[in-house]
Image (cartoon, rainbow, N blue to C red):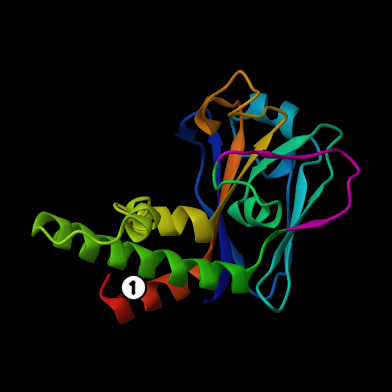
Amino acid sequence: PDHWCSISYYELDTQIGETFRVRKDRTEVVIDGGVNPAGAKHGRLHIGKGVRISTQRDGSVYLECLSHKSVFVRSYYLDFENDIEYGTTVHKFCSGSPSKKIFDLRWAFAEMEHQSKSARLAVVAQAAAVAGYLPPANIASSLIEHVGTGVDDLRRVCCIIAISFVKGWGVGYNRTSIKETPCWVELQLHRPLQLLDQLLKKNEY
């Protein structure tokens, strides 16, 4: 792809301004109060010096918190790295903490293949069960969690990172959703999106 990521800025559940695309020859971008769209003065106070997002040649993505306040990140790769159930934890980055990997392309591709294969097997198992052919209990239980896994799920897990400034959400926080935080950004990573598209076409998902 000509661009390696797209960045959308939100206040609560509303996108402010246009989505910003980062060209592949620009390996890092700083998201700070200065790049806020006009009229988003409230958000600027939260973002401060913001974060630096950078990408490596292998497709990995790193984040560094430049702000004097913490940022909160939804990264399924970090869930994987910390052996945490996907989507149950928001990862806190404190001011002054070193740059840290928040996405790995090899992990994403392996995850896409695993989840899409499991989802296909789950559909087959479900159809067999409807027809009266029940799989062994151990196989049934391992597949049932993948019933209903769709393209949006794969895209969210493998291709999208969300970053909230100042306010966290989820377990342990007052806000249940990132859409309840004052200002946040969503990163869509183009290379894994491209790989996912190729995988889905190959499998006719």
Mark 1, secondary structure of its residue = helix
Judged by its main secondary structure, the magenta piece is: loop
Which residue is farthest right?
96
For the point 53% across and 72% down, the residue is 110
State which quarter of the image contains the C terminus: bottom left
Q: Which of the pair 181/202 is nearer the observer?
A: 202
User: In the displayed structure, would residue 114 be above or below residue 57?
Assistant: above
Please indicate whether residue 48 sits to the left or right of residue 125 in the image: right
Residue 21, x across and y down, in percent: 56, 61
**Which residue type carries mark 1?**
Leu
**Residue 125 part of the magenta-drawn span:** no
In the image, is residue 173 above or below residue 90? above
Question: Can you identify the residue that label 1 sits on?
Answer: 200
Placement of 197 over or under 130, stated as above or below = below
**Residue depicted at x 51% and y 37%:** 16
Foreground of the two, 141 or 174 = 141
For residue 96: magenta?
yes
Q: Depth check: give the residue in front, 144 or 163.
A: 144
Question: Start and end of the magenta stretch?
Answer: 88-101
Where residue 66 appears, x then y in whole percent?
84, 44
In the visual, does 126 lie left or right of 160? left
